[in-house]
Image: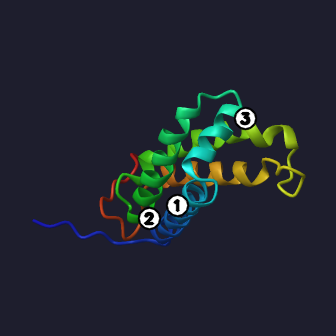
Amino acid sequence: MSTVTVNTRADYAAFLLRVTMGIFFLVHAGLKIFVFTPAGTVGFFASLGVPGWFAYPVIALEVVGGIALVLGYYGRWLALPLAADLLGAIVLVHGKAGFFFTNPKGGWEYLALWIVGLIAVFLLGDGAFALKREEPRR
């Protein structure tokens, strides 16, 4: 017996949020790969006092997490590690620049909003059009 899923407006909202978050992470990872380069990202991490090699798992998380979010394949479960990634960016880079992202060296307002969006994806579930739709327990 097959189960028919009826999508609600909340399911479509979750889809929109999930895909947007995923695309943003793919672009964010692309910046590290194609603009700053992996070697440059390693150097930047080292300049922050973080082991430089840690750049590689962060880039991998952003690529894999971004794809998972876009496709809706365990995306809600990768939303939390991605939020932790952004929290690290606030603590290590943007926090000292103040709240507003327009401040010199960029503040943390944009990243905080992004974190809230990722937590919403986790709480809402994958929504409509997900390859592996898993609803949160109600």
Disc 1 vs disc 2: Cβ atoms closer than 8 Å?
Answer: yes
Does dot 1 land on a helix, a strand or a loop?
helix
User: Relative to residue 19, is residue 97 drawn left or right?
Assistant: right
Query: Disc count in the image?
Result: 3
Name the residue rendered at 71%, 32% in the picture: 48
Q: Nearer the viewer, residue 11 or 28?
A: 28
| Within-10-Å neighbours for mark 1: few <14, some 14–19, many 20+ | many
In the rendered image, which residue does mark 2 sit on? 70
Expressed as whole percent of the image width and height from the top left, the position of residue 63 reads: 46, 54
Disc 2 vs disc 3: Cβ atoms closer than 8 Å?
Answer: no
Query: What amino acid is at disc 1?
Result: Leu
Q: Is residue 48 above or below residue 105?
A: above
In the rendered image, which residue does mark 3 sit on? 92
In the rendered image, which residue does mark 1 sit on? 26
Q: Nearer the viewer, residue 99 or 40?
A: 40
Q: Is residue 19 above or below residue 92?
A: below
Q: Nearer the viewer, mark 2 or mark 3?
A: 3
Which numbered tag is attached to residue 8? none
Coloring scheme used: rainbow
Q: Nearer the viewer, residue 71 or 53?
A: 53
Name the residue rendered at 35%, 65% in the picture: 130
Query: What amino acid is at disc 2?
Result: Val
